[in-house]
Image (cartoon, rainbow, N blue to C red):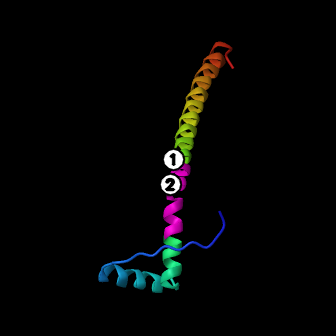
Amino acid sequence: MPGNYSIQVRNIDEYTFNKLNEMAEKAGMTREGYLRKMLSNYALSEEIKKVEDKYTTLVKNLVEYIQMQGEIIEQNTVVLEELKEMLNV
């Protein structure tokens, strides 16, 4: 749903308050903008994790497939060498 929603957080300890101000300043952002960005990133983190898991699985499968293809090439090379010897080529 589009709209402007608000969240208020009360009773934050001084260290956390100061640290968030410092982090926002380093990022060149207002505290509110920085917190908004942090909350958005946190809300997306589950989806990002799912994508990373899919990517990891894909890479693992591709590596296994490439290794299998390498083994097939090695077997074919052995067979071709044997054929060459049998044909005296």
Quadrant of residue 13 in the image? Answer: bottom left
**Badge 1 density bin: few <14, some 14–19, many ≥20, Cα 10 Å:** few
The residue pinned by badge 2 equals: 46
Indicate whether residue 3 is drawn in magenta. Answer: no
As rendered, which of 1 and 75 lies closer to the eye?
1
As rendered, which of 63 and 87 lies closer to the eye?
63
Overall secondary structure of the magenta section: helix
Residue 30 pos. (x, y %): 51, 85
**Farthest residue in the top direction?**
86
Q: Which residue: 30% across, 83% down?
A: 14
Residue extent of the magenta highlight: 39-53
The kind of residue on which mark 2 rests is: Glu
* CA distance separating discs 2 and 1: 11 Å
User: Image height check: is 57 above or below 46?
Assistant: above
Q: Say the numbered circle drawn on residue 53.
A: 1
**2 or 1: mark nearer the eye:** 2
Q: Which residue: 50% across, 54% down?
A: 46
* Secondary structure of residue under mark 2: helix
Q: Quadrant of the C terminus?
A: top right
As rendered, which of 84 and 88 lies closer to the eye?
84
How many numbered marks appear?
2
Residue 88 pos. (x, y %): 67, 16
User: Image height check: is 16 above or below 57?
Assistant: below
Quadrant of residue 75 in the image? Answer: top right
Residue 43 pos. (x, y %): 51, 61
User: Image height check: is 75 above or below 32?
Assistant: above
**Badge 2 density bin: few <14, some 14–19, many ≥20, Cα 10 Å:** few
Q: Which residue: 57% across, 42% down?
A: 58
Residue 28 pos. (x, y %): 52, 86
Q: Is residue 39 left or right of residue 1?
A: left
The kind of residue on which mark 1 rests is: Asp
